[in-house]
């Protein structure tokens, strides 16, 4: 008897804070019948603190390390993962995910992100003190682009539009 099962589809969403990873992730996982995980929530649950508290107590590099630790623990099988915005700083973590999943970059213009992210100082963005949101954006975009298998323009306000782009063949095939 032969085993004709195909590997389960796994999707990892990457992008800036405010790009829609969690919002789109929950809806897309529901539509596609995938299990949804938000790595920011995994970090908060493991450390019993919100990201901003972890950032204030331990610094941005420690928060990035916590994120890498969570990424490396993931074993995907029919999963949709919304990563934290700084996941792309971990080459090892991203390569681990890339072996198991399609990496989808939710691309959003800086001007749109600034409209969406109105709590930058309390959001738990893993960046050095004094680094502006603009600087974070310009530093991270090339990293997102380098890891992406698929890039989706998510400048529109309705998550369903990005989801429709993703589920339209042959995007996730």
Image (spheres, helix red, strand yellow):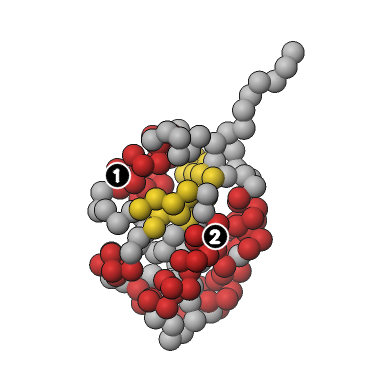
Dot 1 lies on which element?
A: helix
Where is residue 72? Give x, y as percent. Answer: 65, 56
Horizontal placement of 90 versus 136: left or right?
right
Q: Residue at x 72, y 17 (%)?
A: 2
Q: Residue at label 2?
A: 146
Identify the element where label 2 is drawn: helix
Q: Residue furthest bottom?
A: 130
Residue 16 or residue 50, whichever sits in front: 16
What separation in Å lies between label 1 and label 2 (alpha carbons)? Answer: 24 Å
In this rendering, the count of numbered labels is 2
The residue furthest top is 1
Q: Write the residue at 51% across / 54% down.
A: 148
* Image quadrant where one finds the N terminus: top right
The residue labelled by disc 1 is 161
Q: Nearer the viewer, mark 1 or mark 2?
A: 2
Q: Kindly identify the residue that appears in the image at 55 percent across and 78 percent down.
A: 58
Looking at the image, residue 163 sits to the left or right of residue 35; the answer is left
Residue 102 versus residue 109 in the image, above or below: above
How crowded pointer 1 is (Cα within 10 Å; few <14, some 14-19, many 20+) is rated as: some
């Amino acid at each position: 008897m032969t085993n004709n099962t195909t590997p389960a589809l796994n999707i990892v969403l990457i992008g800036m804070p405010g790009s829609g990873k969690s919002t789109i992730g929950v809806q897309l996982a529901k539509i596609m019948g995938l299990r949804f995980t938000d790595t920011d929530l995994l970090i908060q649950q493991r450390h019993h603190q919100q990201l901003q508290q972890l950032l204030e107590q331990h610094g941005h590099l420690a928060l990035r390390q916590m994120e890498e630790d969570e990424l490396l623990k993931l074993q995907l099988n029919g999963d949709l993962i919304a990563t934290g915005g700084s996941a792309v700083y971990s080459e090892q973590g991203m390569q681990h995910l890339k072996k198991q999943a399609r990496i989808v970059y939710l691309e959003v213009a800086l001007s749109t992100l600034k409209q969406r992210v109105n709590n930058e100082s309390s959001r738990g963005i893993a960046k050095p003190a004094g680094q502006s949101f603009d600087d974070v954006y310009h530093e991270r975009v090339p990293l997102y682009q380098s890891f992406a298998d698929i890039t989706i323009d998510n400048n529109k306000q309705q998550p369903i539009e990005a989801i429709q782009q993703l589920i339209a063949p042959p995007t996730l095939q």
